[in-house]
Amino acid sequence: MRVLIAPDKFKGSLTAAEVAGWLAQGLAGSGVDSTQLPLADGGDGSVEAAVAAAGYTGRSCTVAGAMGTPWRGRMAVRGDTIIVEVADTCGLATLPGNRLRPLDASSLGLGQAVRQALLRSPRRVVLALGGSASTDGGMGLLAAFGFRFIDGAGRVLPPSGRALLDIASIDAAAAVRLPPVDLVVASDVTNALVGPEGAAAVYGPQKGADAAEIRLLDRGLRHLVEMLSCNGFPDAEVLAATPAAGSAGGLGFAAMLLGARMTSGAEFFLDLLDFDRHCATADLVITGEGRLDAQSAHGKLPVAVARRAALVPVVAVTGCNEIPRNRWGSTGFTEVYALTDYTDRDTARDPALTADLLVRIGRQIVSSSQLGRSAVTSRYPRSRCD
């Protein structure tokens, strides 16, 4: 039996490599060898996945973290392609004391990392937009490229979501022009920048914003678009309404303003990590991520894996599962195992418990699949997320 273990991370608990490793240990305990292919979809862990499985080299870069304090991040370099991720430059992990700061966090660090990447004269720079801490509309990214955001008193505003409503004018006269480079945004978020399905409304709560702060941020993002439209960027309104403009607190919008093109994060990294070649020799694929829900069918990595796998059976392992059994087939999964079916404890913040359960599930997959034939029914039929 040839098993390919190709999961994403379990956010807040284990990296993709750790998830793959613990599942592999469970399979090995039942006498089944496996190949491990840790994946990413453009979120946090994208640089790590490229370095671990795609022949990229990690290069350090010191930038401003989400609150402006120095942060030592990494970019992935291979040939003329460089991958930079939000999460490891100015994302949630860079917040001092892990304290959420939805109004004050900035995307400046990502811009600084991209500027450093461009010094290597790449042909392509990939922006992995996931795990961001800010909702500043990419104000920080643009500031790193020389955009000056000025308030009514003529002072230059430091970038943040809080500062958006204070912008009275925008000076891009000294902005850095990008050299000939293919700037690619890898994201599976399809939200526009503003409105009820925009960056603030949908993703603000994940960054600590309450209802009043969400309204403030959405107004600020609208104001940013208006100011850009009045200061030499007539296509700002169109770009703000483009799918994925709302990714990473509006970084998708700012990146498009700089000339970036959008691509599916899941599909990009499946190609980058040569998933098709690995899958071609597999009898069973095990994939997964921290949560499976209604959004998973809209371009999320595990479903993209199942679609790529075609006739190869695909088992999903997740922290919690909200996809009902009668929809497993439409997502491409022959079986779904959720950690919440094995414990009532919160695994999202307990890496040791998560690891133990993944080993147990690895053994269970072998037992249920009878070395390749996927089980029709599960011993654990419940589907819930606490």
Image (tube, helix red, strand yellow):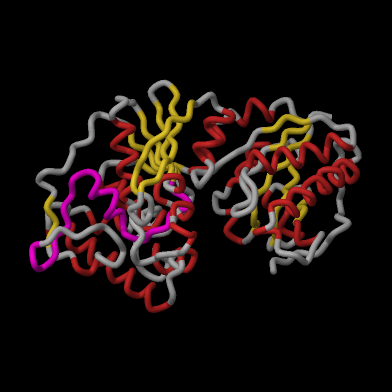
Residue at horizontal 25%, vertical 29%? 180
Q: Residue furthest top?
A: 79
Residue at horizontal 45%, vertical 24%? 78
Range drawn in magenta: 129-154
Q: Does the magenta stretch include residue 153?
A: yes
Q: In this view, does 135 lie to the left or right of 313?
A: left
Asked if residue 231 is positioned above or below residue 114 in the image, the reply reads below
Residue at horizontal 55%, vertical 53%? 298
Q: Nearer the viewer, residue 260 or 172?
A: 172
Asked if residue 153 is positioned above or below residue 34 in the image, the reply reads below
Q: Is residue 234 left or right of residue 274?
A: left
Q: Does the magenta stretch include residue 40?
A: no
Q: Which of 175 and 381 is in front in this view?
A: 175
Q: How would you classify the magenta stretch by its main secondary structure?
A: loop
Task: Answer with the quarter of the image where residue 63 lies.
Answer: top left
Image coords of residue 352 (percent x, y): 73, 51
Q: Which of 147 and 379 is in front in this view?
A: 147
Image coords of residue 108 (percent x, y): 31, 50
Residue at horizontal 41%, vertical 41%? 72
